[in-house]
Amino acid sequence: WLYTPYNIERVEAGINNYLYDLTNMIMSTNTPTTTRANHHIALEDKHGAHNYHPLPVVLSEGKGCHVWDVDGKRYFDFLSAYSAVNQGHCHPRIIDVMVEQSRKLTLTSRAFHNDQLGEYEKYLTEYFKFDKVLPMNTGAEGVETAIKLCRKWGYDKKGIPANQARIIVCGQNFHGRTTTIISFSSDPDAKGSFGPYTPGFESVPYGDVAAMRAALANDPATIAGVMVEPIQGEAGVFVPEHGYLKAVATACREQNVLFIADEIQTGIGRTGALLRVCGDCSCGGHCERQAETYVRPDILILGKALSGGTYPVSAVLADDAIMEVIQPGQHGSTFGGNPVACAVAKEALEVIRDEKLTQNARELGHIFRDEMQKLVDTHPKLLTLVRGKGLLNALVINDSPESKTAWNFCLALASKGLLAKPTHGNIIRFAPPLVINKEQLLEACGIIAEVVREM
C-alpha cells in the first residue's frame, strides 16, 4: 500500500514539510529566511524593467500543483502561469520529450524543413479538426497572426476595399500587449501613452448579443471578423450567458464575417472542456473533440497550455479557404514551428488526454465553487461572489478596485502557502494546475477559508 505512486508522493511531501520547518528553526537563529528572496528581488528591481508587480515570493522549484521558494517553503500554485501550466509544473513526460529533442535538433528556421513540423501539424489539425495550422511562439503572436489572416481573407475572399477592413472586439478584452493589440484595449495601464493606435477595430460590450448584432449590421461589407475570448480571464473571469458564443458565431455567418476565438487562456482543458467554445454548446461541454456539435470558430488561437508550461508554443488554426490566403513571405517566425516546440506541444496535448485533465477540471471546478460560495454566504462583508468554469475561477472582494484589500488577501494567502494574484484591483483569480486532486484542492480551500476568517 505504501509503495503506490500516490502514497510515495504523500510521504515525500511530509518529509519536505518537516525539513522546511526544521530549516526555518535553524535559520531563525542566524539569518532571516527572507534574505535569499530579498537578494533576488533587489537584483530584479535594479537591473530589470519595472513592467510587472509580482508578489514578494521568489520561486526556485515546481512539481505538479506545488512550487517552492528559495527558502524551501512550499506553496499551492493557484495561478498556473496564467493557465500555461495546466499539466502541472515540470511534468516528467513533457520534460523528457523536450530534453530528448533538444539533444538532436533545436532550430532550423523555416528556411528548411525539419522532421518534427509536419508530424506536429498533422497531429494538431486532426486533434482540433481544422485543415491547417500556422505555428507561432507566444499568445500575442497568435493574436497578431489571426488579425493578419482575417484581414487578408477580407481583402482576397470577401472583397473588402483596400485598407478598410474592420474587426469587432469586446470591451474589457485582453488579447496581449503589442502595439496593435493595445489599440483596441480598454485597459488604461496597457494602452495609455503608447499611441498613435492602429485603426480598424471597434468594440462592443462583452456578452451583449444585441450590441454585437447591431455592430455587425453597420456596413457589414467592410467587416472581416469578430474576435472574442470565450471567458474573459484577465478582466476578472467573466463568463457570458449560455448561448452567447453560439449567437455570435451565427451572427457572423449571417454577415459573411469570420468568428475568431481567442482560447489562449481558456483552451486545453482549463474550463472543463477541451475548448471553451465547446463548453457553450448544447451538450454542456462533453462533446469535446466533435467538431460537428460545438460552436466552431473560423479561426482558433491557442497558446499557453499548448506548451505544457515548458517552452513557448502558440498556434492559429483555420480551414483551407481561410489559411490559403497567406503566401510565402507574408507572415512567419524564425522560431515558429521549431522542432522542440513541435515535440513539446504534441506531448502536452497527449498528457491532457491520457490523464483526463479536462474531466478533472470540470469535476473539481464544481467543488471549488461550492466551497467558495459557502464563504461568500458566510462572509458577505468581505466577499461578493464567486464565478468561473472548470478550474478558472474568481473571487470578488467586497471593496473598491482602488483598495488594497485583494492584494493584502493574496499576501495573507502566500504566508499560509497558497499563491494567487489580484486582477482589476478587487478580483482574485484562482486557477491551479489541472493535475491537482480533490484532497489537495480541499486543503487549498481550507487555506482560503482561514484567510477569509482572519480578515
Image (spheres, rainbow, N blue to C red):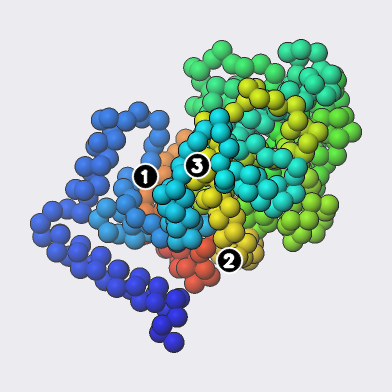
Spatial CA span between label 3 and label 2 = 22 Å
Q: Is residue 232 left or right of residue 44?
A: right
Number of the label disc, if any, that sits on residue 55 = 1
Q: Earlier in the sequence, mark 3 or mark 2?
A: 3
Q: Is residue 180 above or below residue 42?
A: above
Q: Position of residue 38 (x, y in %)?
A: 23, 43
Q: Position of residue 415 (x, y in %)?
A: 33, 56
Contact? badges 3 and 2 (CB < 8 Å): no
Q: Nearer the viewer, mark 1 or mark 3?
A: 3
Report whether residue 390 is seen.
no
Q: Nearer the viewer, mark 1 or mark 2?
A: 2
Q: Earlier in the sequence, mark 1 or mark 3?
A: 1
Q: How crowded is the residue under tag 3: few (<14 C-alpha within 10 Å), some, or many (20+)?
A: many
Q: Amino acid at mark 2?
A: Glu
Number of the label disc, if any, that sits on residue 355 = 2
- The residue that disc 3 covers is 312
Instruction: Give the residue drawn at x 59%, y 28%.
Output: 332
